[in-house]
Amino acid sequence: MEVNEPEIDTITRNTSSEKESGQRKRGREGDKRIGVAAKLSSQLDRIIQTFESSVSAQDPTSITPCVEKLKDLLGLERGSELFYKAIRLMKKRANKITFVALEEPKLQLGWINMTDHRWVSEILNGHPIRCYQMFRMKKLVFLELCDILETKYNLKKTRNVSIYEQVGLFLYMLSQPGSVRNCKKRFQHSGETISRYFHSVLKVVCMFAKDIIKHVDPSFRDTLDEILKDARYHPYFRDCIGAIDGTHIRVCVPFHLQGVYIGRKNYTTTNVMAVCDFSMCFTFVWAGWEGSTHDTKIFMEALRKPALHFSYPPQGT
């Protein structure tokens, strides 16, 4: 029997040629679809860009019209610290919307001033534990301290910084392991402003300390009630007027002075002598001694200097 091999080869070639032509056709169709998709994508991008540019040009809450309003705002001096602070506020959309919604220049300026101490207000009006964590004192104590420093020691508020913010800044610097840079971020003030208000509050606090860190009875004629009414202390401590000790507080000092400030702690400290009574109130504090200074030397120096007003029983009592 004869086999028609040429016919099989012809059928195979026809089938392969049809597959190749079909693949080329599908490839051309795929290229067309890719080209159409790319054109649509580019057109959509142009439409979106055009829409966004038109919206931003008409949107009164965009940064450009807000800055123009700040330039014309009465009471806001160009180039001042408050002016640049207002510009930083405009970076957030919520602030821009609020600023534009107020409309009246007087209200807008008042809102800008209010945001200066917004963080302090949030602390005081928030959970009580936050005030203690940030300022190391309860809310009522903080408010009373601000009132005392303002009324009795003439701490002045300014147009840009309130009494609450000044005292809050001072306490934040003391209570938190932070620097001037951290305070700049927290309170949104310049480093010069932070330093200036810190030292102004420090000055009145030192005046306040002289009036409250002292014995209630400098003559020590009467035995304290805490001793008389406690069998553990009376009669053994009937002549005791308080407790005295020294504590080392870590400090940063210039390199050429570090030697005398390094003591048994193996790092730079200042040796502070403090005296307290049986009510756990400080009656004397002397700070500033080098960390290598012995407690006995500080104590003897306190006795020798009348200007320090170190309280101790008069002779013969």
Image (cartoon, helix red, strand yellow):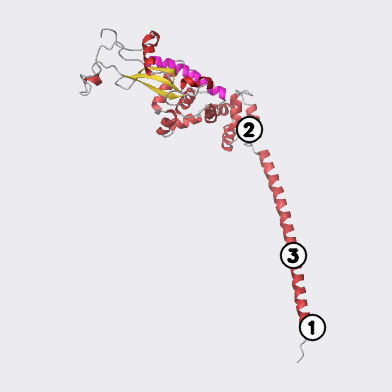
> For the residue marked with disc 1, what is the amino acid?
Pro
Give percent across and percent down for residue 199. Answer: 50, 19
Give percent across and percent down for residue 222. Answer: 24, 13
Region rendered in magenta: 191-212
Task: Locate residue 62 relative to residue 154 in the image: left or right.
Answer: right
Q: Per the image, is 164 magenta?
A: no
Q: Which quadrant of the view contains residue 241?
A: top left
Element assignment for label 3: helix
Read off the residue under disc 2. 66
> For the residue marked with disc 2, what is the amino acid?
Cys
Task: Classify the position of the N terminus by image quarter.
Answer: bottom right
Read off the residue under disc 3. 27
Residues under labels 2 and 3: Cα distance? 54 Å
Nearer to the camera, 243 or 166: 243
In this rendering, which labeled residue sits more in front, label 2 or label 1? Answer: 1
> For the residue marked with disc 3, what is the amino acid?
Gly
Please, which residue is most extreme toward the top here? 316
Nearer to the camera, 212 or 221: 221
Q: Quick one: label 2, few (<14), some, or many (20+) residues within 10 Å?
A: some
Element assignment for label 2: helix
Nearer to the camera, 36 or 296: 296
Give percent across and percent down for residue 231. Answer: 20, 23
Q: Quick one: label 3, few (<14), some, or many (20+) residues within 10 Å?
A: few
Task: Classify the position of the C terminus by image quarter.
Answer: top left
Task: Locate residue 199 relative to residue 23 in the image: left or right.
Answer: left
Q: Which mark is residue 6?
A: 1
In this rendering, which labeled residue sits more in front, label 3 or label 1? Answer: 1
Element assignment for label 1: helix
